Image: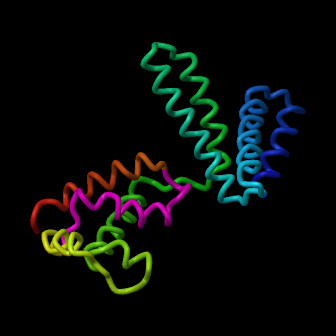
Amino acid sequence: MLKEKLQQDVKDSLKNGDKQRRLVLGMVLASIKNKEIEKRNELDDEEITSVVSSEIKKRKDAIEQYEKGGRSELAEQEKQEIRILMNYLPEQMSEEQIRTEVEKAISEIRSTGSASSLQAGSAPSTSPGQASSLQANSGQAGPKDIGKVLGILMSKIKGKADGQFVSQIVKEELSKQKSPV
């Protein structure tokens, strides 16, 4: 369905003479086609959303490079392309919503002591190395739990928030957790 919307929007932009929109959407459709060839199957909407997110990330990286190189006009063009692409992503979560989800994920880790038990839905199984880590943790989530928290979070909010921004919030929240309560 999302692919059809992209294709229709390319046609509409051709009719309306919106060259930039046509080019941006054409590039996204080409990326989708490449991914389909690689996968040897059509992409579903979730996978297409992932491709669009990837295209946005590429443009954000380009903006950073252009700004470092003093090429503000090219950075602005990339920003315009991002604005076009954002229309094809699910509504983005606010910082407050992300923080709420981060706090829930941290609470889950505290209550189970292991992210693997959350994903498997079974009792926590610990290796000797994990056991000492969990004992040192004593139910507290700390900075070393970034991967666990992100693992829980990203499955819930994939496509609804920028991964780097989520990671930054997780680091902030876990650094607050570090001090004993």
Residue 60 is situated, as x and y percent measured from the top left of the image, at 51, 34
Q: Quick one: 134 or 14, which is closer to the camera?
A: 134
Residue 3 is situated, as x and y percent measured from the top left of the image, at 78, 51
* Relative to 108, residue 13 above or below: above
**5 horizontally vs 86: left or right:** right
* Relative to 76, residue 171 above or below: below
Question: Magenta-highlighted stretch: main secondary structure?
Answer: helix
Quadrant that contains the C terminus: bottom left
Task: Specify the farthest residue to the front.
Answer: 128
Residue 137 is situated, as x and y percent measured from the top left of the image, at 16, 69
Question: Residue at 26% of width from left, 52% of height from top?
Answer: 172
Question: Residue at 11% of width from left, 60% of height from top?
Answer: 179
Task: Specify the farthest residue to the bottom.
Answer: 123
Q: Quick one: 39 or 30, which is closer to the camera?
A: 39
* Relative to 63, residue 180 above or below: below
Task: Specify the farthest residue to the right.
Answer: 15
The answer to if 145 sits in the magenta stretch is yes
Question: Residue at 16% of width from left, 60% of height from top?
Answer: 178
Question: Residue at 26% of width from left, 57% of height from top?
Answer: 173
**6 horizontally vs 131: left or right:** right
- Magenta part of the chain: 139-161
The colour scheme used here is rainbow
The answer to if 71 sits in the magenta stretch is no
Q: Quadrant of residue 77?
A: top right
Q: Quick one: 8 or 59, which is closer to the camera?
A: 59
* Relative to 136, residue 73 above or below: above
Task: Specify the farthest residue to the top.
Answer: 70
**150 horizontally vs 5: left or right:** left
Q: Quadrant of residue 115?
A: bottom left
Quadrant that contains the N terminus: bottom right
Q: Quadrant of residue 33?
A: top right
